Image (cartoon, rainbow, N blue to C red):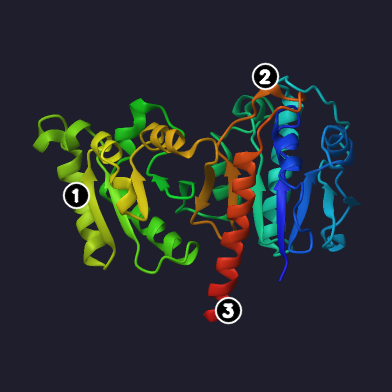
Amino acid sequence: MPIRVAISIGDINGIGPEVALKSLVGRDLNHTVPVLLGNRQVIEYYSNFIEPKLNFRFISSEKEIESGFINVLDCYEGENVHLHPGELTEQGGKLAMMAIKSGIDLCLSEHTDALVTAPISKEAINKAGYDIPGHTEFLADNTGTSDYMMMLVNENLRVGLVSIHVPLSKVTGLISQSSVYTNIKIMHRSLVNDFNINEPDIAVLALNPHAGDGGIIGREEIEIIEPAIKKAHSEGISTSGPHPADGFFGNKKYKDCDGILAMYHDQGLIPFKTLSFGAGVNFTAGLPIIRTSPDHGTAFDIAGKNIADPSSFNAALDLALTLAKNRKQRNRRN
């Protein structure tokens, strides 16, 4: 059965449109049915750089989506689009968010099976009046989801985060028994339902150096993280930790588990990106829809030059297809 994938092309002045188009070269469009969310002007501009030429179908309604084509749905609602590759603009932020909202709606209405989002500029979307830290929070708000997780995925790693886009000074205020336990549960449910891992092992990282050294350099491990792990254990979830993050990655313990729960953004993303070699994927676990994205930004410095590497976007699209198939199979069994 074909998988329909909505693709928001991100900031039109970044590398999003380019890597999205490059990821579709050579795809079997009868099995993968892409729905690019942007408009004809933007798609035709960036497709001029792409070889071989792609087979587009420009549509005005989700009812016109067909297999065998790269469907392009105009979601900019009559906006007079101004392309400025490499520049941060307010309109670039506005159009990016319009595309994401369109993708969410397509998935919630089941016209598409998954959403892949190209990079946005947080500065541009804030200029456009969107007072949000990033994609993840916007997706949660617009799907009515309170318990969700930013998870980074590659062929061998799945790293979830307890806290996401917040200053480091605010992290400790977000680490509680409830938040750690809730994120263990979200990760466990996603590993089972999305990744088809029936009895996953989850490793939980410590917050402090040396896991607090018995409380000498922090008591969060003793008072917060360990009780959350014990509670998850009591419910049959295989969970270990808290592990000192440096030793965990330095000694390659990540190879012995199915998922890793990090306490804050850089604790999880620095080792993940180091080990992913440009092919990592951002997946939002806990949503009623499947959403993935590449693990890089808009790269304004190389936008419009046809030199952007689509590896991470390819991986994001491949993961979206896999997760959509997994959910369909599980739903049929249930």
Q: Label 2: which residue?
A: 301
Dot 1 or dot 2: first in sequence order is 1
Circle 3 crowding by C-alpha within 10 Å: few under 14, some 14–19, many from 20: few
Q: Which mark lies nearer to you, 1 or 2?
A: 2
Residue 179, visible in the rendered structure: no
Disc 3 and disc 1 in contact, CB within 8 angstroms: no
Q: Label 1: which residue?
A: 226
Q: CA distance from mark 2 to mark 3?
A: 46 Å
Q: Is residue 175 above or below residue 237?
A: above
What's the residue at 74%, 29% (across, down)? 92
Q: Which mark lies nearer to you, 2 or 3?
A: 2
Q: CA distance from mark 1 to mark 2?
A: 44 Å
Circle 2 crowding by C-alpha within 10 Å: few under 14, some 14–19, many from 20: few
Q: Which mark lies nearer to you, 3 or 1?
A: 3
Residue 35 coordinates in the image, percent (x, y): 77, 53
Left or right of 209, for residue 159: right
Q: Secondary structure at mark 2?
A: helix
Dot 3 or dot 1: first in sequence order is 1
Q: Amino acid at mark 2?
A: Asp
What's the residue at 73%, 19% (across, down)? 87
Q: Secondary structure at mark 1?
A: helix
Q: Secondary structure at mark 3?
A: helix
Left or right of 303, for residue 233: left
Dot 2 or dot 3: first in sequence order is 2
Disc 2 and disc 3 in contact, CB within 8 angstroms: no
Q: Label 3: which residue?
A: 332
